[in-house]
Amino acid sequence: MRLSKSLIPTLKETPAEAQIVSHRLMLRAGMVRQMASGIYAWLPTGIKVLNKIAQIVREEQWAAGAQEVLMPTIQSADLWRESGRYDAYGKEMLRITDRHERELLYGPTNEEMITSIFRDSVKSYRDLPQNAFQIQWKFRDEVRPRFGVLRGREFYMKDGYGFDLDREGAVITYKQMMLAYMRTFQRLGITAIPMRADTGQIGGDLSHEFHILAPTGESGVFYDADFEAGDAFAHDDVEKFYEQMTTIYAATDEKHDLATWETIPEARRREGRGIEVGQIFYFGTKYSKSMNFSVNGPDGGKIFPEMGSYGIGVSRLVGAIIEAKHDEAGIIWPDAIAPFKAAILNLRQGDSVTDGLCEELYKALGQDALYDDREERAGAKFAEADLMGHPWQMIVGPRGAANRMVELKRRATGERFELPVDEALAKVHF
RNA sequence: CGGGGCGUGGCGCAGCCUGGUAGCGCGCUUGUUUUGGGUACAAGAGGCCCCCGGUUCGAAUCCGGGCGCCCCGACCA
């Protein structure tokens, strides 16, 4: 994109409503605009990041054998009456009435709906196990939205649902999902740690939360330094992986167990704060039974599928990653999800040599690049590029351009390289 | 849902106490200037002062009632 023709309304000053750093940076970098309390419009750079995260989540779900579906945001109240949650869910659920006085709701989650879909179509034990997910907008009418997209009312989320014939199968699915999640977070460029969790109002008896480490996190976390290694989940054996994930110590303050904690060598004990970006549950037959979803078994009997649900907060990840990856100057995007791999900074707009070289670079990089072609001073371009957090800055000044040399700056480290055009392009095309 | 605060050009704010018809910085437009870390000067554009009602000759300012937004707590992906 050409910055001069882009809807990227960056701000020099911080809007008063933004308290935490990710919210401030998202507003200052022009990624989002608040439209109502806890409800945001996503502008071009914001939606690019959101889509990139969603795509990685999607690919890892596919790789784990889950099938993608898309369910509506609006659901019928009757569906929720079947499980009993219409009354149980409380004020967090946004309830809507249509012109015929029919009761509807904006979905906060989709266990009922997916169960209903499977109930209509899946009749035999031979059809299971299956696993389906969607990436869709949800709404929870939080009492107090805050922290920008970290705690919005409307949010974008991957929700997946596993259907198995027995508990053993469901537990295997659960473990596979945990592995898929760790791979997902690794690809996103962040460290997330699975921690034992309460099952909350969804119910069940096996659940983990995934937390990203960030000093501004909402909950205190305690974990073994082994998690920092990052290769803890490098192997493909699900059982070994799960064994490892659940024996290395990690707990949020709610579940923190001092006795176990003290068995860990002091040098490996880590305390910090975490932001929850995903949660997985096994909850058995809660919905299959309440909604009467059974399949015929081999002996002619009924089997109520064992279910689990698997969530990743996609829009929340945008904020959470910024909390984990920023400095005083702005955002530091991991390569995989940056809105642009590189910004091309033309330091002498209007000069035929720099203009020509920048156009050439822009053509070579295409959609991966943001070309700062504005008639701004160098300082302004540097400041905005740092703020927006592009992994690379291709700095094109008149001196270098004359010799077909550009300067590459790596945002994360501040390293600078003086390189011929071809080498610079090759480096950016990682 | 308890407690606190704030609504004034796109953003950050002053003015309100002590009513007299709106101001500053940033941004935006034009010109000159500057040219590797948010340049300087000049001239401009842009405002139902959140809304409704009341008091008054006169309300951004005082009074009443709404609405919106933020923060702390309880709650949650």
Image (spheres, coloured by chain):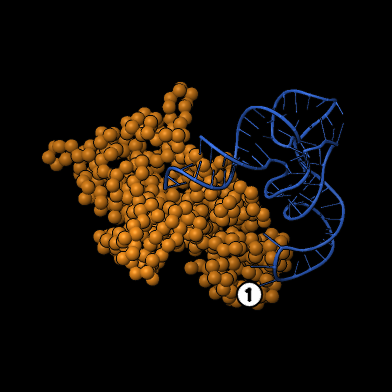
Q: Residue at x 34, y 59 (%)?
A: A258
Q: Amino acid at mark 1?
A: Arg
Q: Is residue A359 above or below residue A403?
A: above
* In this rendering, position of residue A38 left or right of residue A232: right
Q: Picture quarter containing residue A195?
A: bottom left
Q: Is residue A373 left or right of residue B32?
A: left
Tell me, yes or no, if residue A58 can be seen here: no
Q: Which colour is chain B painted?
A: blue
Q: Nearer the viewer, residue A243 or A336?
A: A243
Chain A on-screen colour: orange
Q: Residues within 10 Å of mark 1 (few under 14, many from 20)?
A: some
Quadrant occupied by the N terminus of chain A: bottom right
**Image height of B69 relative to A173, above or below:** above
Q: Is residue A420 left or right of residue A218?
A: right
Identify the residue shown where x is 36% and y is 65%: A224
| Residue holding disc 1 | A404
The answer to which quarter of the image holds residue A370 is bottom right
Is residue A34 visible in the rendered structure shown here? yes
On the image, the x and y values in percent for residue A168 come to: 21, 50
Please, what secondary structure does the residue beneath circle 1 have? loop
Q: Residue furthest left?
A: A299
User: Is the residue B8 above or below the residue A274 in the image?
Assistant: above
- Closest to the observer, A104 or A373: A104
In the displayed structure image, the side of residue A165 where residue B73 appears, left or right: right
Frontmost residue, A118 versus A312:
A312
Residue A156 lies, in percent from the top left, at: 46, 46
Residue in the image at 47% along x and 52% along y: A218
